[in-house]
Amino acid sequence: MRHLWEVLLAAEEEGIPEEKLRFVHTPTGSGYMELSLPCLNQTWLDEDEQAEGGQTEDINIGVNTYYRFYDIFYNMFPPDAAEFPALRESLTNLSLHMLAQNDIRRGLTKEDYHKRLLAKEILAGSFGGMTKDVFLSMNRPEQEKLLGGWLNSFRVGSALPVFLDMVHDLVSDSIVYHSNECPDEVLVYTGLRKERNLEQRIQFLIDTFLDIRYHVEIFYEYHFGIIGVEETMQIDAIAIC
């Protein structure tokens, strides 16, 4: 562990409550590392010490507060500071907990950054009004799946596998059939009733992720009949292709 946020992640993995962590200023720590731990490449937290009554003591984590946060702490620990040591320690601990949480919230991967940029473009209307409407109709997990699939399509080009993933993820109770005899024919079935928002969402996925050469047939609520599959050969419940 080298940074504050890694301590919080390690504590979560080990089942240690965050309130058991106590960050302390270490004036004699390395000037080249943020954390001052017993082992140089330590990847665990020590929770062996027991207090009276069998409860575990707080885990002290030494921190070189000047490594990244000199502007915040340089007045907190002057060489001759002797007054209010407990107050300074408590404020330091509280401040470092807040800074560590801020690190976690701001920790973005390259793909997360690209997703934010893409979402910003969508909401600005750069991809058209229908795209914006469909995006706003989705909940947060659906938006994340759409953005991830869209970025994937940018990397691989318009591809049928990406379209299949998007339909399965974003259209409930759906099945996509790809004809072996006609490679450019795609059949999409959903058990949902046809309505404007659903129709708009499926059309958006077709326009975004499929090449123009594909011919797509969409079936709502009623499945088309497949010879040999009894579930699809029900009287008054068959869609005609």
Image (spheres, rainbow, N blue to C red):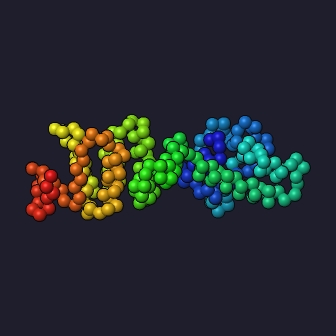
Q: Is residue 226 left or right of residue 62?
A: left
Question: Which residue is located at x 24 percent, y 51 percent?
Answer: 188
Q: Position of residue 102 (x, y in %)?
A: 63, 52
Q: Quadrant of residue 200?
A: bottom left
Q: Is residue 81 left or right of residue 66?
A: right
User: The N terminus is located in which quarter?
Assistant: top right
Q: Nearer the viewer, residue 50 or 240?
A: 240
Q: Is residue 147 left or right of residue 74?
A: left
Q: Position of residue 133 (x, y in %)?
A: 42, 58
Residue 50 appears in the rendering: no
Q: Position of residue 88 (x, y in %)?
A: 80, 56
Question: Which residue is located at x 58 percent, y 47 percent?
Answer: 107
Residue 219 appears in the rendering: yes
Q: How many marks?
A: 0
Question: Which residue is located at x 19 percent, y 42 percent?
Answer: 179
Q: Position of residue 45 (x, y in %)?
A: 61, 47
Task: Judge whether 5 appears above or below 235 on screen.
Answer: above
Question: Which residue is located at x 76 percent, y 37 percent?
Answer: 31
Task: Judge whether 230 appears above or below 70 on screen.
Answer: below
Q: Nearer the viewer, residue 92 or 190?
A: 190
Q: Quadrant of residue 19?
A: bottom right
